[in-house]
Image (cartoon, rainbow, N blue to C red):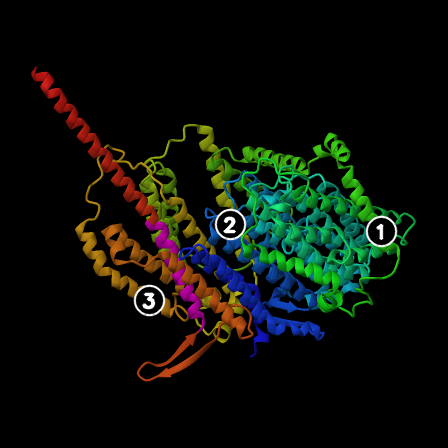
């Protein structure tokens, strides 16, 4: 096995692991997080390096591990020319941003949190561009939305950062759901979710009746992520993020994720009128809106944000043309835009860092204070404007050429190059404004800081990016040409068309358009005051955010109205809606089908024990209802119900379920007892007779309905799925306990999801109870004070003696679980009860002094162990969580079985113990602190009374 067999998932997942170390490193040294992040990025590049040569040899590297093959889900990665280009952009620009951010962030900013977020976002982007499986791609796609939300809202104390992050999350998250729907339809049409199969099925997809829905759903995901009209407005508000975030997310990565998807699906979805109108139309409108609006922004980052929107529209429009040459121009401009826009955002951050503001009406004449930064900014802005001998000029000339080619497609297509030229004119104008207003145009006005050059290493990332702008613009054939060629081949999935990167093509229409754009752009800037006045009088008032907020407000009001209709602050009211709806659905189902209500299957004979158990169950249930006002007695009756249910499981030969039911019952009773301590000991009486009558009728109908439904199912013949498990438990899972084999093997993914939910529940309870203080009652409902003997000696002695025995039983139940009733879940509950009993009997302080293991570690180790079991199987070429087993023959011990599932079961055991003990102990701590608080209040009250009586005594004697 070589590195080329598994390096791609390491490249994608390494930043997620690095995020943990980056967050941890900040505890050692504030700057350590930056160096950890840089090291992780360089390490990811090192793992990618051995595969970089493959795309240049026309080879596509695919690394795949089966995950859930039944639904076509694989853990699969792909490296072709397009993926390599984006992976390099993500890692190289990411490394430069990390170096830059190390000097940008202030001492008040949390370095660990920032670089942890940044690395998680980097991993999410790498997952998108390197994914071979489409469902896996969508997972990483949604992770970019979540991690970008964290980065945009990094300055949590700022309202604009929180609002911008929320807007970005709502729009891109909704787009992600649309993308998921489109991908599911696409995979269903093709018969596979792997890109290799999808990219080869272009004709099949375009001829299918679902082509248009697939296209629309995928494009919604693309347009929301890449800020295309009508979803473009979220990007300027995301500028509330720190400038390193803007330089990374909004120039080279996040907003390019949608563009990447256009390039990736180009061979499959392009070439149809629907593609041209939707993609080209959105791109053209976005191009114009962004170029026009950028000119009127006073904030440097606002100008750059709208210019980014415009250039993203340019790239989208090129893909919308649908020709191979247009795709070449689009990919070329992706490279160029990433370099000059990242450098410009970094310059904006430098200016803000050294002057204290980004308002171009105040920061004038910075050339003499920051000459080095000014030269860098001028070169990058000139590249953005399309000035010759810079990289932006070459790709814009290709853009003009493709716009002219598109003008021949129909009678009205001549408008395309005209509109493109108008956008280019505004591009020159806003680039010139950036240069002139910031570095010339008189003196600065009332700056918070005295401007000066930034630290040397803060400028190095900008230096490198500007050098790339120059070298690509002057020597394109020796710099960008090889990378561009393999990226185009990866996007088109065929030989690239013939194109030229020459600087001089002679006098032609594209050159003329470039010249006109430069001249008229200067002219527009020269008369900007009149244009500004006209803009402020009208169009400046248009704000898509108003529409967005109005839609959100309308949705909130509608949701509140619906909630008020169904939920009136009463659990009974909510339950009634659910139960009545279920009854109506069942009634309609039974009455509209002509089949007999019950089947002909023979029923089991009734025996005296079953009748007795049923009577106990009914009596306990009725007593729970009748005595519900006395909550402790009602809780005891509920315990009886649980005990009878476990006996029912025993009756029907389900010992695993019986053990689980008993263990859960014990834990639940303890939980409810701890909760009841803070609740009134009696519940209020139901006074309205009509309400009682209504509840009784609904309860009877519900019971009858469930009974009829159960009888209707069980009296009919059917083939249960259990037959499969019974036949394959030993041969497939190596265990005779079918229930346990199902949990750890056949349905292992379900179990993994369940323990994740359990872990989150435990951590959530822990977090919610931190610092909470609740008043505790000092007497019962009859006025009798609670006993001060919190830990009776008899209980202490017994529990300490029973503790090792209970743990031994837990270990025994755990080890036998694969072949006999037991397993990790039941053993975990037994071990948790053993620990909880120690806390109850001996007190929290005494137990914590002797059991110093943090349950957070138990939960974490459990999840890691369970997940690692599945990953090991994938690493060996088997589906996720596939188990294996063998038999060993040891002296004395004899022959016994060893199954890999025991490691997964160990993970379940640890999570169950950790989450259960953590939740109940935190409730116990709350009870303990409340009791101490009550004692303190009583002591203060006694002292106050004593002082008052002492003060009264002398007065009475006088």
Does label 2 or label 3 sit earlier along the sequence?
2
Q: Quadrant of the N terminus?
A: bottom right
Q: What are the residue bounds of the magenta stretch?
A: 900-921
Disc 1 to disc 3, C-alpha distance = 79 Å
- The residue identified by callout 2 is 105
Residue 99, horizontal then vertical, whole percent: 54, 57
User: Which residue sits at x=14%, y=22%?
Assistant: 951
Secondary structure of the magenta portion, mostly? helix
Helix, strand or loop at disc 3? helix
Does label 1 or label 3 sit earlier along the sequence?
1
- The residue identified by callout 1 is 513
Q: Residues within 10 Å of mark 2 (few under 14, many from 20)?
A: some
Disc 2 to disc 3, C-alpha distance = 51 Å
Question: Viewed as shown, does residue 433 lie left or right of 370?
Answer: right
Q: Looking at the picture, does residue 57 appear above or below residue 535? A: below
Q: Is residue 753 magenta?
A: no
Farthest residue toward the left? 957
User: Which residue sits at x=66%, y=38%?
Assistant: 442
Residue 287, horizontal then vertical, whole percent: 76, 47
Mark 2 touches mark 1? (CB < 8 Å)? no
Q: Is residue 368 visible?
A: yes
Helix, strand or loop at disc 2? loop
Does label 2 or label 1 sit earlier along the sequence?
2
- The residue identified by callout 3 is 811
Q: Nearer the viewer, residue 884 or 610?
A: 884
Disc 1 or disc 3, which is closer to the eye?
1
User: Which residue sits at x=20%, y=41%?
Assistant: 787
Q: Is residue 651 visible?
A: no
């Amino acid at each position: 096995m070589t590195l080329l067999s598994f390096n791609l998932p390491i490249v994608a997942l390494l930043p997620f692991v690095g995020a943990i170390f980056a967050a941890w490193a900040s505890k050692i040294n504030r700057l350590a997080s930056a160096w950890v992040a840089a090291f992780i990025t360089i390490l990811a590049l090192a793992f990618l390096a051995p595969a970089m040569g493959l795309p240049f040899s026309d080879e596509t590297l695919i690394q795949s591990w089966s995950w859930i093959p039944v639904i076509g889900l694989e853990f699969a990665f792909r490296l072709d020319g397009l993926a390599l280009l984006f992976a390099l952009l993500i890692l190289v620009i990411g490394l430069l941003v990390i170096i830059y951010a190390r000097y940008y962030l202030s001492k008040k900013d949390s370095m660990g949190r920032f670089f942890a977020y940044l690395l998680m976002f980097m991993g999410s982007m790498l997952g998108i561009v390197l994914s071979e499986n489409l469902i896996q791609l969508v997972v990483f796609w949604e992770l970019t939305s979540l991690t970008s939300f964290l980065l945009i809202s990094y300055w949590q104390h700022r309202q604009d950062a929180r609002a911008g992050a929320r807007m970005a999350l709502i729009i891109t998250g909704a787009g992600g759901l649309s993308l998921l729907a489109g991908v599911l339809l696409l995979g269903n049409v093709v018969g596979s979710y792997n890109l290799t199969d999808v990219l080869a099925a272009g004709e099949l997809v375009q001829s299918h009746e679902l082509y248009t829905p697939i296209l629309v759903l995928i494009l919604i995901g693309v347009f929301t992520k890449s800020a295309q009209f009508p979803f473009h407005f979220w990007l300027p508000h995301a500028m509330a993020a720190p400038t390193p975030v803007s330089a990374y997310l909004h120039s080279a990565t996040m907003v390019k994720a949608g563009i990447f998807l256009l390039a990736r699906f180009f061979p499959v979805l392009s070439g149809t009128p629907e593609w041209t109108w939707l993609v080209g139309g959105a791109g053209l409108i976005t191009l114009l809106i962004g170029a026009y609006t950028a000119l009127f922004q006073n904030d440097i980052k606002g100008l750059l944000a709208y210019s980014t929107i415009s250039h993203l529209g340019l790239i989208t429009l090129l893909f919308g043309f649908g020709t191979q040459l247009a795709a070449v121009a689009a990919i070329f401009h992706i490279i160029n835009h990433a370099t000059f826009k990242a450098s410009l955002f970094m310059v904006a951050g430098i200016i803000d860092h050294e002057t204290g503001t980004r308002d171009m009406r105040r920061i004038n004449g910075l050339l003499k204070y920051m000459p080095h930064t000014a030269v860098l900014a001028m070169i990058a802005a000139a590249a953005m404007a399309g000035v010759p001998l810079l990289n932006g000029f070459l790709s814009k000339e290709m853009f003009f050429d493709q716009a002219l080619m598109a003008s021949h497609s129909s009678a009205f297509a001549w408008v395309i190059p005209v509109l493109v030229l108008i956008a280019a004119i505004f591009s020159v104008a806003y680039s010139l404004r950036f240069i002139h207003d910031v570095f010339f145009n008189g003196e600065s006005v009332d700056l918070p800081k005295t401007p000066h050059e930034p630290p040397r290493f803060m400028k190095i990332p900008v230096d490198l990016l500007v050098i790339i702008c120059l070298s690509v613009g002057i020597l394109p054939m020796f710099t960008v040409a090889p990378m561009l060629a393999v990226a185009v081949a990866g996007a088109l999935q065929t030989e690239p068309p013939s194109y030229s990167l020459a600087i001089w093509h002679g006098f032609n229409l594209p050159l003329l358009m470039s010249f006109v754009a430069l001249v008229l752009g200067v002219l527009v800037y020269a008369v900007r005051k009149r244009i500004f006045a006209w803009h402020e009088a009208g169009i400046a008032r248009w704000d898509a955010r108003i529409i967005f907020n109005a839609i959100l407000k309308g949705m909130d009001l509608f949701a509140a109205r619906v909630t008020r209709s169904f939920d009136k602050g009463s659990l009974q009211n909510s339950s009634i809606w659910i139960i009545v709806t279920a009854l109506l659905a069942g009634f309609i189902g039974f009455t509209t089908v002509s089949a007999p209500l019950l089947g002909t299957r023979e029923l089991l004979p009734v025996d005296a024990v079953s009748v007795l158990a049923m009577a106990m169950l009914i009596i306990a249930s009725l007593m729970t209802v009748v005595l519900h006002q006395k909550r402790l007695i009602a809780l005891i009756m509920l315990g009886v119900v649980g005990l009878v249910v476990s006996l029912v499981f025993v009756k029907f030969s389900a010992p695993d379920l019986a053990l689980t039911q008993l263990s859960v019952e014990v834990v639940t009773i303890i939980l409810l007892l701890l909760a009841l301590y803070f609740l009134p000991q009696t519940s209020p009486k139901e006074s309205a007779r009509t309400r009682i009558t209504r509840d009784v009728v609904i309860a009877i109908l519900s019971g009858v309905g469930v009974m009829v439904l159960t009888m209707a199912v069980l009296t009919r013949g059917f083939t249960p799925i259990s037959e499969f498990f019974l036949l394959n438990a030993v041969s497939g899972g190596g265990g005779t306990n079918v229930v346990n084999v199902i949990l750890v093997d056949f349905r292992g993914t379900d179990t993994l999801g369940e323990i994740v939910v359990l872990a989150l529940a435990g951590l959530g309870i822990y977090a919610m109870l931190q610092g909470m203080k609740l008043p505790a009652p000092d007497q019962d409902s009859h006025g009798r004070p609670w006993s001060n003997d919190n830990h009776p000696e008899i209980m202490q002695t017994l529990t300490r003696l029973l503790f090792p025995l209970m743990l031994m039983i837990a270990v025994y139940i755990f080890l036998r679980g694969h072949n006999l009733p037991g397993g990790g879940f039941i053993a975990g509950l037994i071990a948790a009860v053993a620990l909880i009993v120690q806390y109850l009997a001996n007190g929290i302080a005494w137990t914590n002094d002797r059991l110093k293991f943090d349950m957070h570690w138990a939960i974490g180790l459990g999840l890691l162990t369970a997940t690692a079991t599945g990953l090991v199987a994938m690493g060996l070429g088997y589906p996720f969580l596939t188990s294996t087993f063998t038999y060993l023959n040891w002296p004395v011990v004899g022959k016994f079985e060893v199954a890999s599932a025991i490691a997964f079961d160990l993970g379940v055991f640890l999570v169950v113990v950790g989450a259960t003990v953590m939740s109940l102990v935190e409730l116990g701590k709350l009870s303990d602190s409340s009791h101490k608080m009550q004692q303190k209040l009583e002591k203060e009250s006694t002292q106050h009374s004593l002082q008052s009586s002492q003060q009264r005594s002398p007065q009475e004697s006088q």
